[in-house]
Amino acid sequence: MERSTPSPAGADITAADDEPPLSDRPEHECTAQKIAPALLPRPAGHGRNPGQWHDWRWQLRNRIRSMEQLGGHFPAFGITPDSLKAAEKFPLAITPYYLSLIKKPDSSDPIFLMSVPQGQELQNPPFLEDDPLDEDQHMPIPGLVHRYPDRALFLVTSACAMYCRHCTRKRVTRSRESCISTARLKRTVEYLQKHPEIRDVIISGGDPFTMADSVIESVVAAIRSVPSVEVIRIGTRTPVTLPFRITDELTNRLRKYHPVWINTHFNHPNEITPESVEACGRLADAGFPVGNQSVLLKGVNDDAKIMEELLRGLIRMRVRPYYLFQCDLVAGIEHFRTPLACGIEIMERLRGRLSGIAIPSFVVDVPHGGGKVPVLPNYVVSASATHTVLRNCEGLLVSHPEPYSEEIRNQ
């Protein structure tokens, strides 16, 4: 049974009684229950209860939270002292669903790489930082990052269904899983009302869709109550790691507050499954434009053929490739980083092979709050007042005439 919800700006940010991702504690912890490895479904799916398996609450409660649990699923997986230390420093959480996508429990498997702690996470060059984008320095109030003049990033929870090993906010997962309080939501609304230049609010975390339906709606309704906010975006990886979370109940609640955009995070074709296709289709059918933000990851998708397969799959499921990010300079992800030249080469190979709607922008989020910088292959060979020489995707040089100036016309 759900508790009554007050007006949006002062909403009671607590869970419904039947929605366990949030607890009833005053600090609104989002901790999920741990269970013994023997009670978890094996990755191959033997012994699954279909009703439980498709219940997103069950998936959250039964996340793999320790290396010992992981070893119970993959007896051949060698747990090393360094991987244990990495799991202690950067906690792990893997939904049973996402675990089932691992085909081989070693570094040759992209799903394994993105979800399982590695000893390399402890190896950090001096230029890597916990908060390289200076998000904490750009918070005028707790949880609201106001870095660009016209938009703000609203961090509403520290919880995720699955903790990606390449996460740009690995620092957040070190703390307990918590969700926004009533007081903080009210303070955020007040800040937005005082700053009408903010027209676009991105709701993120953590993952907002780990929260109860009523909590998510309260947050979205509160932001929508600010007249100057034109667009609301929600960042979530649940279509990838917990597709059962995208329910009709959730979409029906949120579609009342359009325009609401959804950005998700597919990195590899193996993440495109019938379940994820259905989840994204449900979002699209409810009128949510869905975009995808991938991260270029060594050993996962640093290959033009893999990236092409991923992008084609996204377009088929009505998900628009939005960004391909160069790895942020975050402590714990050096083993995922690729040279910038790798991303440039991939982008050049995609051009001409894919429709323009399937090609994302390759960007670097510049450290210390410098913003996103697009990085493109150089297609301009030379330029003069009369012609610019361009190189196309096949290497053909084409001379493109410039408009006549008055000086040229009079010659």
Image: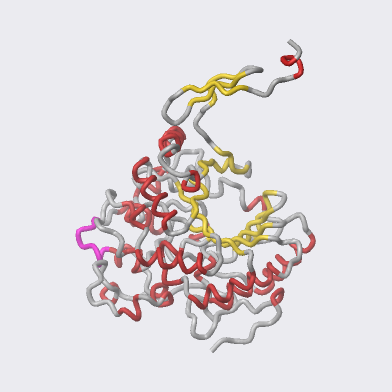
> In which quadrant will I find the C terminus?
top right
Q: Nearer the viewer, residue 22 or 295?
A: 295
Residue at figure coordinates x 51%, y 38% from the top left: 127
Q: How many marks?
A: 0
Name the dominant secondary structure of the magenta segment. loop
Image quarter of residue 276: bottom left
Horizontally, residue 194 falls left or right of residue 64, namely: right
Residue at figure coordinates x 40%, y 40% from the top left: 353
Image quarter of residue 275: bottom left
The location of residue 134, given as percent across then percent down, is: 61, 48
Question: Where does the magenta region start and end?
Answer: 71-78
Q: Residue furthest bottom?
A: 1
Q: Is residue 65 above or below residue 353?
A: below
Q: Is residue 349 above or below residue 141?
A: above
Does 74 appear in magenta? yes
Residue at figure coordinates x 63%, y 53% from the top left: 136
Q: Is residue 1 above or below residue 154?
A: below
Whether residue 195 is visible here, answered yes or no, is yes
Horizontally, residue 178 falls left or right of residue 274, namely: right
